Amino acid sequence: MRVLRLHGPRDARLTDEPVPVPEPGEALVRVTAVGICGSDLHWFSESAIGGVALTRPLVLGHEAAGVIADGPRTGERVAIDPSVPCGHCDTCARGLGHLCPDVRFLGYATGDGAMRDYLAWPEAQLVPIPDTIDDVGGAMLEPLGVAIHALRLARLRPGDRIGIFGAGPIGLLLIQLARASGATQVIVTDRLPHRVAAARALGAVAELVTDGSERAALLEATGGEGVDTAIEIAGEDDAIGAAIDLVKPAGTVVVGGIPEGPAVTITGAAARRKGLDLRFARRMNLVYPQAIALAASGTVDLHAVVSDRFPLSDAPAALASAARREGHKVMVLPGR
């Protein structure tokens, strides 16, 4: 089977490897779609993420869908939950499996991901999807889950204004979720004009980040009141600063973006003066049923976020394209 392995910064190579043999409790999955995430781009560009560095050639990809290829569930179309918490530690016992210190995760550290023809994965993490969700939509359920989790942490109430700082794929999903959840106004910033245009097309009040002056225009758009809650999803200090500037006193700021290095800078004085609730979002937790319901009903348009599709044979070019940030979500389709 074909496998894409990352050997170093921007060094992704297709190789031919044996089809994996499932362990007890696992099933073989024929991978049909894999989304390229911002975290994949950190691996691709830097060979590291959040202080974890590449130690051997790694298969990327954790946003994935496929078809079960063996066992009693053969032929079943599934979304692949990339997270396998240990299930035994105190964190798991508290219902926080996404934060498990011993979690096994696709395409992270030493755990190979889904950018290949076949994958062996625990059956319990293979989530059935209805025919109303196609393969690309099945892979998009993971980033939708990340957006749902961040919005839960933001504690948006119907009638609230929300700020979303970063209009990449998850930011565009957050716009749709916020509007569906009753937000009266969605304020958005991004550094890329095509992302600002996409945010506006989804009904947001969006401004291009230049020198910080756009914050005054966004504050004016709220009638000078600011936003009730905010989510930073750009992985940039400036986005965190904008969220802190625009959120109301006693509001909530969720930091969900992945920075280039292990540290972020927060304007602590302003956050303290406002008495803000500063929260951090990582991955997702127990959201697949909700994500499937939102996608199947059409409440969230997953395809509105997908701009490019590549076959697995062109996966290195897909990563390079995504790293240039010319579009939105880039998909690799092994079956094509």
Image (cartoon, rainbow, N blue to C red):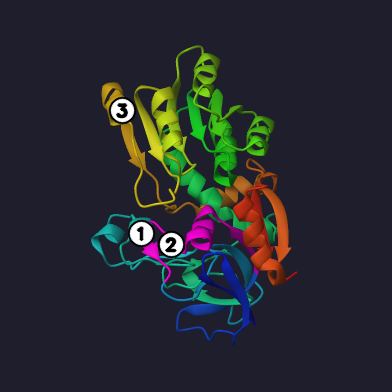
Give the mark, 1 or 3, whose residue is nearer the N terminus: 1
Of the 4 image quadrants, the one containing the C terminus is: bottom right
Residue for point 59% across, 27% down = 207
Q: Give the magenta part as a residue range.
A: 32-54
Q: Residue furthest top?
A: 223
Q: Are marks 3 and 2 in contact (CB under 8 Å)?
A: no
Q: Nearer the viewer, mark 3 or mark 2?
A: 2
Amino acid at the residue labelled 1: Gly
Residue linked to disc 2: 48
Residue 51 covered by magenta stretch: yes
Q: Nearer the viewer, residue 247 or 56?
A: 56
The span from disc 1 to disc 3 (Cα, nearest Å) is 26 Å
The span from disc 1 to disc 2 (Cα, nearest Å) is 7 Å
Give the mark, 3 or 2, whose residue is nearer the N terminus: 2
Q: Residues within 10 Å of mark 2 (few under 14, many from 20)?
A: many
| Residue 195 rendering spot, x and y as whole percentages | 64, 38
Q: Residues within 10 Å of mark 1 (few under 14, many from 20)?
A: few
| Residue 155 rendering spot, x and y as whole percentages | 41, 34
Of the 4 image quadrants, the one containing the N terminus is: bottom right
Residue linked to disc 1: 51
Q: Is residue 165 visible?
A: yes
| Residue 20 rendering spot, x and y as whole percentages | 55, 84
Q: Residue furthest left?
A: 90
| Residue 182 rendering spot, x and y as whole percentages | 54, 28
